[in-house]
Amino acid sequence: MKKEIKTQIRINASPEKVWQVLTDFENHSHWNPFVRSITGEVKKGNNIKVVLGPQGTKPMTFKPTVLEFDQDREFRWLGHVLFPGIFDGEHIFQLLANEDGSTTFIHSEKFKGILVGLMAQKLDTEIKAGFEDMNLALKEQVEEMGVEV
């Protein structure tokens, strides 16, 4: 079974400024209500440690593989619950430059595996809300830096 969650938000700052906040992993715990921490060397092909979960829930710890880490454009990883094929998630952050100097931040995840059907309702509610909370917090964090378009 497959499922995708896709959210987006417009941020009044350049992709470079959004990337700066998004990839300042040491400070995620100060502003990010969904991705609580990212540790390890974030580089394509490397495994990192990610602690995430919506506010009000017990966060989960994953050790995904970085699939893409393209400065000012995209950060993508692939994680698994237990082992591949049970519940796999390809988590994607994309930054698209807009003509007015702002950025469209796209936050999505593609899920596949035998447990996806059982988790579908939670994905559509709690997890999607967690994405949206993170998007808004990222927007606020970047825009508070005093950057205007």
Image: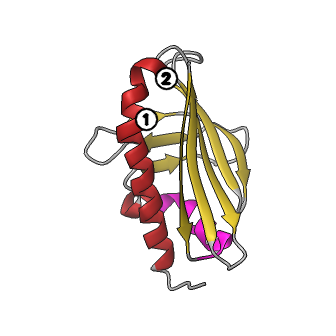
* Mark 2 neighbour density, 10 Å: few (under 14) some (14–19) many (20 or more): some
Question: On screen, 115 above or below 104?
Answer: above
Query: In this image, 41 relative to 28: left or right?
Result: right
Figure quadrant of residue 105: bottom right
Q: Which residue is mark 2?
A: 81
Figure quadrant of residue 126: top left
x then y, percent, for residue 142: 51, 73
Question: On screen, 102 above or below 19?
Answer: below
Tell me which amino acid carries mark 1: Thr
Q: What is the chief secondary structure element of the magenta stretch?
A: helix
Q: Which residue is mark 1?
A: 61
**Magenta residue span:** 13-26
Q: How many marks?
A: 2
x then y, percent, for residue 130: 39, 48
Query: In this image, 135 relative to 111: left or right?
Result: left
Task: List the single residue furthest toward the left.
Answer: 56
Mark pair 1, 2: CA separation: 10 Å
Residue 107 shows in this picture:
yes
x then y, percent, for residue 30: 37, 63
Comparing 22 with 42, the one in front is 22
Determine the residue positioned at 49% across, 81% down: 145
Membership of 23 in magenta stretch: yes
Q: Circle 1 sits in a helix, a strand or a loop, which is it?
A: strand
Q: Circle 2 sits in a helix, a strand or a loop, which is it?
A: loop
Q: Quadrant of the N terminus?
A: top right
What's the mark number on residue 84? none
Q: Are marks 1 and 2 in contact (CB under 8 Å)?
A: no
Determine the residue positioned at 51% across, 48% down: 38
Membership of 51 in magenta stretch: no
Determine the residue positioned at 71% across, 50% down: 69
- Looking at marks 1 and 2 on the same chain, the residue that comes earlier in the sequence is marked by 1
